[in-house]
Amino acid sequence: MTFLLESLLYLQVTSLYQSLLKPEINIFTTSNVVLDTLLSEGNFFQTWKGKLTKRKSAPLQVVSDCEIFDNYLKSQGLNLTKLRSNDYIIACLGMTSDLKLLIMEAAPLGNLRHYLETKANETYYNMTSLKTLEMNLINQIIEGVDAVHHLGLPGLFYSLCASNVLLSSDQKCKLSGFASDESVRAREKWEEENNVRTNLC
């Protein structure tokens, strides 16, 4: 049943692209944010763009991956508010109006330090001292996954691939590609085996 629904969703999205229409989805947020990011729900990646007003729903439109990436480079990451006082949740972008999907900034524990030391390109972040910022970044990230699971919502987690790291002026880690936690693990394993960097566009 799930496979059938996902297949129908894929066909609908493909059809909309082909007809040059821009599908919309309503997102509810708890703070004022501008959303420019890749969203992943299940195995289907979709790209959305829109302005979100506190406690109101807003339609988000599909845009190209390259446009999203360009916007991230220009803005050096979104200025977002933390979901709560958990040091490891970087930000909450919002949630769907039916409250079934939480959209948030986090990353899985694992190879963040190794990633920052070996894969990050200075084109994509404005770090001044890796050693100075390392613990701060790790302290923003480590427990994010558990915190989301405890909320009882299916979380979305940023993908740690080399073209996706940005660091905003307030020293918050911003990553420009979303992936489910399973997809993140699969991608990291694939990158390790193939020793290549995944580019967004």
Image (cartoon, grey):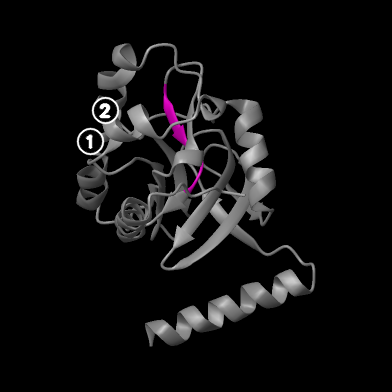
Name the spot of residue 50 as percent of width and height, x first: 65, 45
Name the spot of residue 105 as percent of width and height, x first: 40, 40
Above or below — where is 89 with respect to 103?
Answer: above
Q: Are marks 1 and 2 in contact (CB under 8 Å)?
A: yes
Q: Can you tell which quarter of the image residue 109 is in? A: top left
Q: Is residue 104 left or right of residue 97?
A: left
Which residue is at the front of the view, 70 or 60? 70
Residue 30 among those drawn in magenta: no
Query: What type is the residue that disc 1 sits on?
Result: Ile
User: Which residue appears at 51% of the width and 41% of the height?
Assistant: 176
Which residue is at the front of the view, 15 or 131? 131
Magenta region, residue range: 172-177
* Residue 142 numbered mark, or none: 1
Per the image, label 1 sits on a secondary structure element best described as loop
* Residue 41 numbered mark, or none: none
Q: Residues within 10 Å of mark 2 (few under 14, many from 20)?
A: some
Name the spot of residue 140 as percent of width and height, x first: 29, 28
User: Which residue appears at 68% of the width and 53% of the height?
Assistant: 64
Q: Is residue 64 left or right of residue 197?
A: right
Query: What type is the residue that disc 2 sits on?
Result: Ile
Residue that label 2 marks = 138
